[in-house]
Image (cartoon, coloured by chain):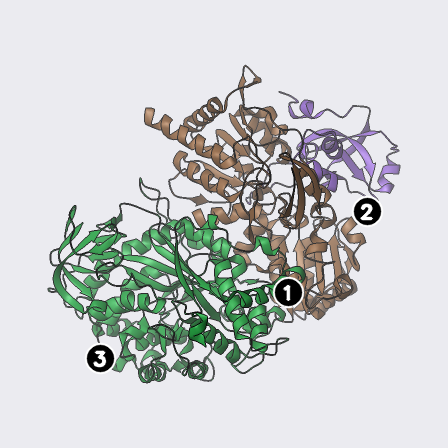
Chain colours: A purple, B brown, C green
Amino acid sequence: MISGRTLAQGAGCEDKMSRLYIDEVSCCYLSEEDYRALGLSDGMNLLLTSPHGSAVLRAGVDKGLPKGMVFIPMGPWANMLTGTDTKGCGMPGFKGVEVEVTPTDEKVLDIRELMLRGR
Amino acid sequence: MRLQIEDVLCTFCGCLCDDIRVEVDGGRIEKVRGACRLGSSKIMGHSRIKSPMIRVNGELREASYEEAYRKAAEILVSAKHPLLYGWASTTCEALKKGILLAEEIGGVVDTTATVCHGPSIIGIEEKGLVGSTLGQIKNRADLIVFWGCNPSEAHPRHTLRYSSNASGRFIPEGRKDRKVLVIDVRETRTARNADRFLRIQPGTDYEMISALRMIIGGKAESLPEDVAGVSRKELVEIAEMMRSAKFGAIFFGLGLTHSRGRYKNVDNALSLVSELNSHTKFVIMAMRGHYNVTGAGQVLAWSSGYPMAVDYARGAPYYNPGETSCCDLLSRRDVDAAMIIASDPASNLPRGCVEALAEMPVIQIDPFENPTTFFADVVIPSAIAGIEAEGTAYRMDGLSLRLRKLVDTEYPSDVEILQAILDNVRRLRDDN
Amino acid sequence: MIIKGGIVYDPANGIFGEEMDICIENGRIAEDAGGEVIDARGLLVMPGGVDAHSHIAGPKLNTGRIMRPDDSRMGTEPRTGVCRPSTGYTVPNCYAIGYRYARLGYTTAFEAATPIIEARHTHEELEEIPIVDKGALTLFGSNWTVMECVRENDMEKLAAYVAWGLRAARGYGVKIVNPGGGEAWGFGSNVKSIHDPVPHFDVTPAQIIRALAEVNERLRLPHSIHLHFNNLGRPGNYTTAIETLELLKDIKPSRMRQVVHVAHMQFSAYGGTGWKDFESKASVIADYFNQTDHATMDLGQIIFGPATTMTADAPLEYANARIGHQKWSNHDIELEESSGVVPWVYMRKMPVNAVQWAIGLELALLTKDPWKVVMTTDHPNGGPFVNYPEIIALLMSREKREEEMKTLHEVVRSRSTLPSIEREIDWSEIVIMTRAAPARILGLEDKGHLGIGADADISIYNIRPDEIDPSKDHAKVKAGMSRAKYTIKGGAVVVRDGEIVAAPQGRTYWVDAAVPERDMDRMLSSLKEKFERYYSIRMSNYMVQDAYLSNPFVVRAGVQPLKEVI
């Protein structure tokens, strides 16, 4: 899994409670090949699990992505999956996190539910 | 009365475009011309935090500014080791006040750089930075390399104003006179507009840079046929593109700093550029994200000697990224209160850090609500710098510019808020 | 306030170690005064120190700090009731710069090089430096507009641009660094002599220097051009130095001062054809200064140990990085300059360093007129300014020089004339080289002396000139000069017994030079085009705004009224 900036994530990033931002950062993208192999279609969700946590995201296709890679616009959903180890340099691993991807019927949480989950 | 304001600075990304035109009518911004989608959306504005709030029995309740300042000061004074975090989307003047506050309460000042281009700064500590202003690149560069960055989405006007599509004295035809090379793990919008796209495997930036350094250094034969999935032949061609440029510029993004290797990737890229200067002219620049993350580093450097992660608990500045940077402080529970200004760590830090934040008193200073508000115990809404308040910001190339005030506001500026908190801190100290 | 009974050195007013009282009223030296009495009986009293060439503020300082956390860890001092925390040795934070100058008894320091487009940053840092008065020189030597005016031989337009540039940068004077080289470095090359044309601009460094010197006098600026020679830092460069000075011999100064001030002369007084036969040519340079009257210099003395080299001479920094295998920062500045920063260490046993050390001292000792010499280390290029007392002790004591030379590489004896120099500088000459001369050279009328009406910037040292023999007691000289007993700035005591007791905000000097409106209009119309086509920022966002100078001191200058010109 890698996380990164997108135009919509950026446009909403100082308006974090907007639909635009939340829709953008709660979606993950796969290569066409992986998307098909998982039998995904429009409106389906994925459960992503990393050694650090898990989250349910909407699934989409990004033709620029190679097989075996998931891209998530940076934000709270991506950060459910990242670890805190900075390897002594202050920077946690935002890119290159190994995740397991499973199609799911679970819904995507709203931002408040996500942030306060388990509290 | 309708007023047209020219040459406005856009306070969104590190491009800090200063050619925006804004129409103001009756104290409201009516129209923004010349900005990108990111910039217009910020300048046009959206819903604001209406009033200061203090959390009582788990719920945020409206309060007066005076009450909020006092509560914030109480939190800071009773904390043993508070964290003052953010600073990338406010003015240098605000950070100056913040540093003074940190000195007086023995806190830590860290900026969003530590989870952005912090590793780039550590790379610069190792190797130095061979750079230039953006105008130098606009006027001279016949080769632009975007490595692990995607300006089409993150810095939309970069290519037009400063890099691939800009024209300049020695590049009169703009894009036609330049070659554009993109190196990335995915084919981004930026890659689609390049003359050449080199796709690499995630986490192999370091290997690619090392291979290019070997080729530039005349040791191509020592390389294997295949370097982490890229053929030697292709790397030799890329190296030749670099060496034969009259003036080359590498812009790099979080693709280097967030991946395996982190600061070592940047260290290696800086070395590559340094070595290229034995053959031709080459510069390198980090694509800084927030509009004043560069300025935050500058103010901290001239105040403390260090550009981020500065701990004042000992009375004198102490700096050790990996120890005094926000992510480490939070995950190790090394701080016991946080003041968050102009940023949103709840969204931008790993879950483990956010959980730590939820356990401690949090003060939030921001014009806008964001997920950090869920965890805040005191919320202080502020004026938007560059729209409602003046101040200084530094562009990604280190050029400082003055932000203008476009419209009046009833919200206090970050500088005023911090001064008021500082006054309250001093008063509480005197009372004790 | 009255300072009673001190042994006063005020060479600008013909006072050479007389016991007398000094009165201060409203921040100035006065005929008489009441109030606080400072007992200075028998102690050394002189005007506050003036540093005419030091790198204390601006982008290159922060570049140094950011690339050198190792340096910031040196010299750490926690905050006190009066002081903010200090860090750094060669690249101190802003607060440390102000406190350390004040502790040495210095009350004025000028930043030696600022590109116009980055002057806002320089002023942000100057604002953070406490206590001392300050100013910044503005870089013009590789500027496109300057070179185009020179090529068109349009001196009116050039004068208008220089006046506008000083205003835009809130700058104090015209600084020229490796003229033309900064532009050539834009494509990775350099100019090799003063007659080597600048690529794409069809002008030579000699033409740039001469034109800027002429315009400097046309504008009647308080300071002369301030010049960092081409070929600086290279063996054999003393010929470039003399050739350049010869260019300027016939220019008439518009004020009572030099026509050219040479920055850090030590770095341009080198003989030899390479590093192997590198030798001092300080005696040749000093002879030239002894025979002419149009030039002054500052030393650029090196200090053994760590330094951070930082200069607008970017090709030099590239060479430094390669020679020293050091980390290297470079910063090209659109349409105006290039620059670089490289950490450095001067070593006693390194032959070149030993000779460099000798050259600085030779220059000071062989130049007969101390009014032509300013003591500097080109901070932090030759070493940090906190070492000034070490240089003072070396200049005052041949015995100390001999002791030092014993610890250096032996070439210091064969490749410099230092061992044979007997001269020992006296207190009056020290006061000239550190106070009176730099103030006069910069054109600061109210500084560097203690006449009635002068700024009440005064230093008092725990040194008894009537009892001490600096030739033998050089350790006491160094210790005494390192911690002022009192430093008085603008009439306020800021240092007492070597400790900071107050940290007021100093003034920032800049020069507002008037030019005929038609010249300015003509210049602006061509400058506008540069902003439309080449600069990456808008003209309306370029000038340093008033907000960045909280305590400005404006010096007026400008071309003479039209009828006088005709």
Q: Amino acid at mark 3?
A: Glu
* Mark drawn on residue B282: 1
Q: Amino acid at mark 1?
A: Phe
* Residue with the mark numbered 2: A64
Can you give x and y, in whole percent of width and height, for residue C547 in the image?
47, 48
Give above or below for A67 relative to C355. above
Give the spatial CA distance, label 2 vs label 1: 29 Å
Whether callout 3 and callout 1 share a subunit is answered: no
**Residue at image point 46% right, 26% down:** B69
Can you give x and y, in whole percent of width and height, for residue C193 in the image?
52, 81
Viewer-proximal residue, C40 or C64?
C40
Viewer-proximal residue, B258 or B300?
B300
**Residue that lies at the very extreme toward the front in this rendered image:** C563
* Residue with the mark numbered 3: C422
Give the spatial CA distance, label 3 vs label 2: 77 Å
Whether callout 3 and callout 2 share a subunit is answered: no
**Residue at image point 21% right, 73% down:** C399
Q: Amino acid at mark 2?
A: Gly
Question: Can residue B195 be spotted in the picture?
Answer: yes
Can you give x and y, in whole percent of width and height, for residue C208 in the image?
52, 76
Q: Which quarter of the picture shows residue B383?
A: top right
Badge 2: residue crowd in 10 Å (few <14, some 14–19, many ≥20): some
Q: Tell whether label 2 touches label 3 (CB within 8 Å).
A: no
Q: Secondary structure at mark 2?
A: loop
Name the chain letter of the residue that bears numbered label 1.
B
Q: Tell whether label 1 touches label 2 (CB within 8 Å).
A: no
**Residue at image point 82% right, 24% down:** A105
